[in-house]
Image (spheres, rainbow, N blue to C red):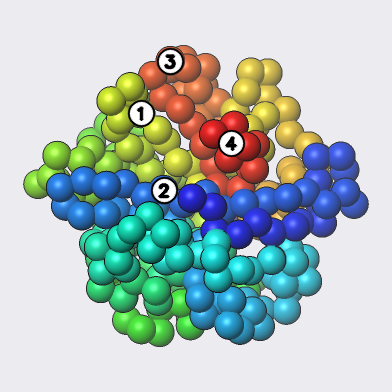
Amino acid sequence: MCPRGARLLVGDGGLLAPARLVCHCLLIEGAEGLVLVDTGFGLDDVRDPRQLGRLFTTVVRPQVDAAETAISQVRELGFEPHDVRHIITTHLDLDHAGGLPDFPEAEVHLLGRELEASRNPSWRERPRYVAAHWAHGPRWVEHEAGGEQWLGFDSVRILPGSDAEILLIPLHGHSHGHTGVAVKRADGWLLHCGDAYFHHGEVSTPPRCPPGIGAFAAFDQADGAARRSNRERLRELAERHSGEVELICSHDASYLAAR
Ligand SMILES: [Zn+2]
């Protein structure tokens, strides 16, 4: 599912060519009910895009549409919002957490470090976190990496009592508590890398990244060294385990087009 594309003033061709961005959310159906990974923009954002802030709306120019919100797409699939029992957020940036108010009954899983960052943002980080997205009082479930390993990465198993194998894979850098989410499928693993990278070329071998997207990623990072290091680890993972792990990121529309 893809809560609405946005147009960013940096693109594949350079600094001024617009690029179409999407925000990939995953919906996982299991015995525990539905698990939603990221929420994109929500209905409140559609009703009042100004709550996203002037900087974001000016630079990214989001095209919010109620039909493309996660809640609308969940309903279109024949489910009710309360069927979504768990939400996992890769991080709490406004374009990933906007739909939280649409699922007030869900438990919201994230790394504790990200919740802390959202509660005490530096002046530079303030535009990325929109307090209205959690004014309803989400049922936060904070996680920390505890030594479990997954293909060389730290990992935290979500829903340990369930059959669903869903892991948080901490990937700090874009934000302080940013995480990937690994989901076991019948044919291997899907790793949703959130905003750990923005363009599929960044995890290709040899790596490549359109300069405009690279500049935007650097502008939007909390810890540049950690972001670049984790991006390189993801590239190595993709190279070593190409038949076993499929990587996607949040905003590269080519992944959606390939489905
Ligand atoms: Zn994002």
**Mark 1 or mark 3, which is nearer the start of the sequence?**
1
Would you identify the image quadrant in which residue 114 lies? bottom left
**Mark 4 or mark 3, which is nearer the start of the sequence?**
3
Please name the residue shown 14% across and 39% down the image: 163
**Mark sitting on residue 26:** 2
Mark 3–mark 1 Cα distance, whole angstroms, equals: 9 Å
Mark 2–mark 1 Cα distance, whole angstroms, equals: 13 Å
Please name the residue shown 75% across and 45% down the image: 213
Amino acid type at circle 1 is Trp
Q: Quadrant of the C terminus?
A: top right
**Mark 3 or mark 2, which is nearer the start of the sequence?**
2
Residue 109: % across, % down: 30, 59
- The residue carrying mark 3 is 243
Would you identify the image quadrant in which residue 63 lies? bottom right
State the residue in front, 125 or 194.
194
Please name the residue shown 51% across and 65% down the image: 69
Amino acid type at circle 3 is Gly
- The residue carrying mark 4 is 255
**Mark sitting on residue 189:** 1
Secondary structure at badge 1 equals strand
State the residue in front, 91 or 12.
12
